[in-house]
Image (cartoon, rainbow, N blue to C red):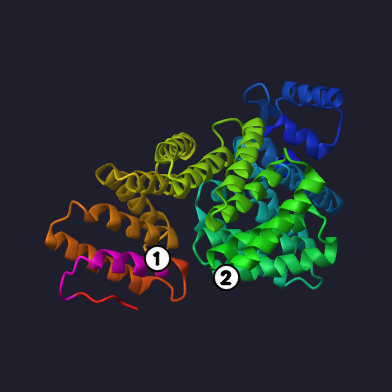
Amino acid sequence: MLAWSGSAPMGRALLGAVVRTDDTTLTEELAIGTRLQILKREGPKRLRMHRLVQEVMKETLPLPEGDVGAICCALCDWFEARKQDFALLPVFEDEFDHLVEWQRVARRRGFVREGVRLLWLQAYPPFHWGDYRKSLGILTEALNDLRTMDHADLPMLAHVLNDLGVIHSHLGDHAKSLSYELEALDIRLQLYGESHRDTAMTMNNVATASSRLGKYDVEREYGERALRVRKQLLGDGDRDTAQSMLNVAATYTREGDTSKALSLGKQALAAYMSIGGEFHPDTARAIDLQGRVYSVIGDNDKAIECARRALAIRVKLFGESNPDTALSLQHLGVSLSVAGRHGEALAPLARALTIQKSLLGEGHPEALETRARLAGASWEGASVPGKRAILKDLDAAVSIAPRGSRVRADLISERQRLAAIGIPGFRTKR
């Protein structure tokens, strides 16, 4: 198995999971390999095969067909159990070289199903780090491979479609996101029915995409269905249940039911703190939502406090050049602006916009939303020529926003509000 793996050292946990032997036997076999200088230890729990030995074994010991399938399946199971949680990302990335190499082996040997699954799993690290375009490329390749198979692998197809929906949502193409999620949901309902973890995940994603398209009745229906299923299957303390709590809390916030929103948000935050602690992306997401609820209530101090706390978590986890960090900067700027502290709001909003344009493109809904917020914060201290420049920038933003989108409506509304000062020569673009 090691002869056909990647060149990086392999962790003992992964090796043990693949060879499926007890710890005592594995220890003895690894000790023999080390004494014979076939294996080389790199740290207490990692080892690699000597390069020349690896090359010779590949030439002299052909890999049996049955072993290829078994090894690929074991690898997939191990990586899939660690794909979702950001806290396990370092472990996942340590073994990434082997994931890539065995996907190549599977493809060369004609193991299409196993190869697609190994390829699909490669999309998770770039997704977690906010490199959505790279993740999209991997998932698109996996989907193309699935479409060419003689017999459809429906569970795998649903996985890839679900994740393509998530990626397109992060990239701002919510119509395409909803299309993928509905296709995935149809497959999962046929395979598993509604009361299944994977089905609930896709229902949650349908709710998210629908919300961003302004389809609020669909958002509420699928969001509440997903939460109900997750509570029944997983309980209140599960990560997936907490995710649904946050989504439904966001629905309540938009509808003005801030009491329910705060209650659900606090439950989600407690679950995330118990699972991953303070410095985890899920915790930051829950704190961020609490801040937005406080902003709606009018408790500006708490809103700003939450925004700063979420930003500190994301900067520590991701650094500044990350879409989630940019979103926290945007929310901090908005909270400061709503509190009347427009001068303090300018720096975080400008930083957010720079990051969003660089990583997501200037036409991304989050970048356009930040432009609107930055215009509003800049207005008070701007000269008359500066205000004219602000209106022209909003006109430019409206021109690239998708027609019928929520962000385009927000941009037009902000432009109309600011134009009310009566600067001649500017008309609202529709």
In the figure, is residue 180 to the left or right of 300?
A: right
Q: Secondary structure at mark 2?
A: helix
Report which residue position mark 1 lands on.
410
Q: In what quadrant of the picture does the N terminus appear? A: top right
At 50% across and 43% down in the image, what residue appears? 288
Circle 2: is it few (<14), some (14-19), or many (20+) Cα within 10 Å? some
- 59 relative to 24 in the view: left or right: left
Kindly identify the residue that appears in the image at 67 percent across and 29 percent down. Answer: 47
How many marks are shown on the rendered structure? 2
In the current view of this chain or complex, which residue is farthest to the bottom? 430
Above-or-below relation of 356 to 184: above
User: At x 39% / y 54%, what residue is drawn?
Assistant: 356
Q: Secondary structure at mark 1?
A: helix
Nearer the observer, 131 or 25: 131
Residue designated by label 2:
176
Q: What x and y, as percent, mark residue 101?
A: 66, 49
**Amino acid found under the numbered disc labelled 2:** Lys
Looking at the image, can residue 372 be seen? yes
> On the picture, is 64 further left or further right than 355?
right
Quarter of the image for residue 359 reads bottom left
Query: Is 151 left, or right, of 335 in this rendering?
Result: right
Mark 2 or 1: in front is 1
Where's residue 422, x and y in %?
Answer: 18, 69
Extent of the magenta region = 409-425
Q: Position of residue 13 (x, y in %)?
A: 74, 32
